[in-house]
Image: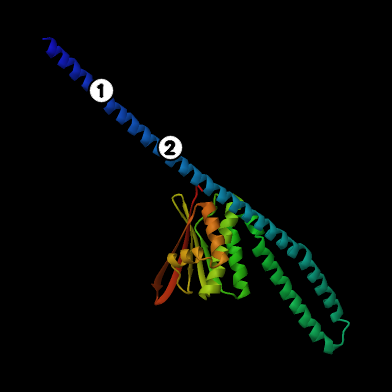
Amino acid sequence: MELELLILLIALLLSFILLSIIIFVIIYQKKIVQLEKNKISIENDKIKLEKQNELNIAESVIRSQENERKKIGEELHDDLAPLLVSANLHLKNYLSLEQPENKNKIQEAIHLINCCIDRIRNISHVLHPAALQEFGITFALRDFCNIINSSNLCQIESHSNVKEISFDQDKQLMLYRIVQELVLNSVKHGNATSFVLIIDKKENIYSFSLMHNGLSFTIDDYYFNLTNSVGLGLKNIQQRLNILDGTISFSSQKIDFEQLNKIEILISSNS
């Protein structure tokens, strides 16, 4: 009887020890898992912080660039353009005093000055789109299209199904620069001569679609050029897209036997 009781006590003790070991292993494993989760969480927070710091730096650089552009644009518009206008008026006054043989030369000089004034105003508007500040991005982009059309660089049709875009001016200016850079890149590197810009909104997503008749360009080409340090323009586009949390896509389609390429920018209204 005593032997059976001893065996039972030993069995209970062994069971308790075994159960304690199992509980210890389970608790230890949970702690290991929790530590791994904490480590991953810390790493993720670190990555997010680094990414946010990069975005903050990029945003600060872009803001500085825009301030410089604004300053140059205002100086061109407010200082240089009036000087040329004044010179133009002086030449017009001389027209009535000069001999007939000199009048043609003066008129030619007046014409050249008028061309310079128009160019300076266009450059000023591109550097610092005052229309964006006063009327918003849809109006500013339409104004940009008019400037491009008047320069004979290419032709752009602009259509907007959106009355107002609910972004602050800094973000609207970033969008403006993205579209501007895409147009100029497509002309310079893609030989595009004709564009159609469509601004739309579906649910909470704004879309900026740019159709052109230039050379096709794929998303692989885009990222290849980004990673291989080719083209400052694409880097500027991507920096702004990162800040806006936007996406870019490229596609091609045939319309009436003509190959058209489409670039689409998607931005959430909650950005």
Lower position in the chain sequence, tag 1 or tag 2? 1
The residue beneath circle 2 is 38
Could you tell me the amino acid type at mark 1? Ile
Left or right of 111: which side holds 254? left
Labels 1, 2: front one: 1
Look at label 2 and name its amino acid: Asn
Residue drawn where x is 60% and y is 65% of the image: 144
Q: Residue furthest front?
A: 3
Name the foreground residue: 39 vs 48.
39
Circle 1 SS class: helix
Q: Mark 2 falls on what kind of element?
A: helix
- For the point 63% across and 55% down, the residue is 61
**Dot 1 corresponds to which residue?**
17
**Residue 202 position in % (x across, y down):** 44, 53
Pick whichever, 132 or 216, lies toward us: 216
> Could you tell me residue 80's position as x and y percent?
77, 67
Quarter of the image where one finds residue 119: bottom right
Check the image and report above or below for 218 versus 34: below
